[in-house]
Image (spheres, rainbow, N blue to C red):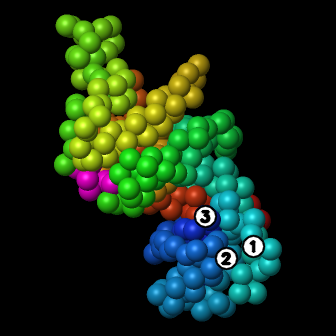
Amino acid sequence: MSIVIGIDVGISTTKIVGIKNMQVVSPLRTTAADPVASLYGAFGKYLYDNHIELSDVEQVVLTGVGAAYIDRPVYGLPTRKSDEFLADGLGARFESGLDKIIVVSMGTGTSLVKCEGDNIQHIGGISIGGGTLAGLSRIMLQTSDIKQVSTMAMHGDISNVNLMIGDISAQPLPGLPMDVTASLFGKAKTDAVKDDIAVGLIHTVLQTIGSAAVLSALNTDIREFVMIGNLTLLPQCRDVFPMMEKLYKVKFIIPKYSQFCTAIGAALDYIYHKG
C-alpha cells in the first residue's frame, strides 16, 4: 500500500489525512501544547489507528504556520512542504468538485484564496476568525471553549443583541429585508444574558467573514464560496450562511471534510506535481 500523508500543522492543533488512490483516508485531528508535539502525536496515532507501516508511506507533506518549526524529515520519511494558500485551494477544489470558487479559510483569522481552474491565488483576508471568537469569549463569557460557547448560543436569541432593519425602519429598504442585520451588537443591553452574548459573538464573526467573502468577489463572476477550517463545524453556520446566500444571491458551500481541506490540499500538491 502506498499512501501520501498531508499534515496541516497549527500552533496547537494538527490535522492529518492520507490520500490513497485519490481517496481521502481517515482524517484525524489532535491537539498539543506545541506544534512539534502536535505533529508527531498526530502522525504516530494516525499510523497506529490505520495499521499503516512507515514503509507504506510514499511522501509526507507539511503545511500550515506550524510547519516552519519542522526542519527535518518526519520519522525519516521523505518530507516536503506545501504553500498553505495553494493547499487551501487544492483541497477545497477537490472536496467541492468546483473549479471557479473563492476559498474562505476560517482559522484563527480568515484568508481568501481565488481558484479559477489551475490558477490559485491568495487575494487577501481579514483578522477575524476563531481567535477573535475565543478572545472575546474569554473577556465576555469567561471561557474560550468554542464548543461551550456554541452550546450557550443555541439557547440565545440573536434579536436581543443585533439591531435589525425592522428595528429602525417601518418597511424593508431596497435589497434589505426586515430581518437583515443593521448593526452587530447594536441592540445589546448592559444586562444581556450570556446565552444572547454567545450567539451574538458567533454571528458577529460568521457574518463578518461572509460579508468579506462576498466583497472579495466584486468585479468577478464568482458566486460560489467554499468554506473551510474549524469554524465550519459551528452549528450556527446553518443559520448564518443560508441567510446571507438569500441576501447576496451567492452560494456558501461547506464540504464534507471542511476542516481537513488544507491537509488534503498539501497531499494533492505532491500528487499533482510529483511527475
Residue 161 at x, y = what percent?
Answer: 28, 32
Position above or below: 197 against 214? below
Label 3: few (<14), some (14–19) or many (≥20) C-alpha neighbours in 10 Å: many
Mark 3 lies on residue: 10
Q: In which quarter of the image is the N terminus?
A: bottom right
Label 2: few (<14), some (14–19) or many (≥20) C-alpha neighbours in 10 Å: many
Q: Which contiguous range is marked in magenta?
A: 149-154
Name the secondary structure under disc 3: loop
Estimate the spatial distance between the alpha carbons at disc 1 and disc 3, rounded to whole Å. Answer: 12 Å
Position above or below: 51 against 166? below
Tell which circle, 2 or 1, labels the residue nearer the N-terminal end. Answer: 2
Confirm whether the magenta stretch covers residue 33.
no
Label 1: few (<14), some (14–19) or many (≥20) C-alpha neighbours in 10 Å: some
Give, as a three-letter code, the residue at label 1: Ile
Estimate the spatial distance between the alpha carbons at disc 2 and disc 3, rounded to whole Å. Answer: 10 Å
Residue 70 numbered tag: 1
Tell which circle, 2 or 3, labels the residue nearer the N-terminal end. Answer: 3
Residue 36 numbered tag: 2
Residue 244 at x, y = what percent?
Answer: 35, 30
Name the secondary structure under disc 2: helix
Tell which circle, 1 or 3, labels the residue nearer the N-terminal end. Answer: 3
State if disc 1 and disc 2 touch (CB < 8 Å): yes
Instruction: Tell me, yes or no, if residue 176 can be seen here.
Output: yes
Estimate the spatial distance between the alpha carbons at disc 2 and disc 1, rounded to whole Å. Answer: 7 Å
Name the secondary structure under disc 1: loop
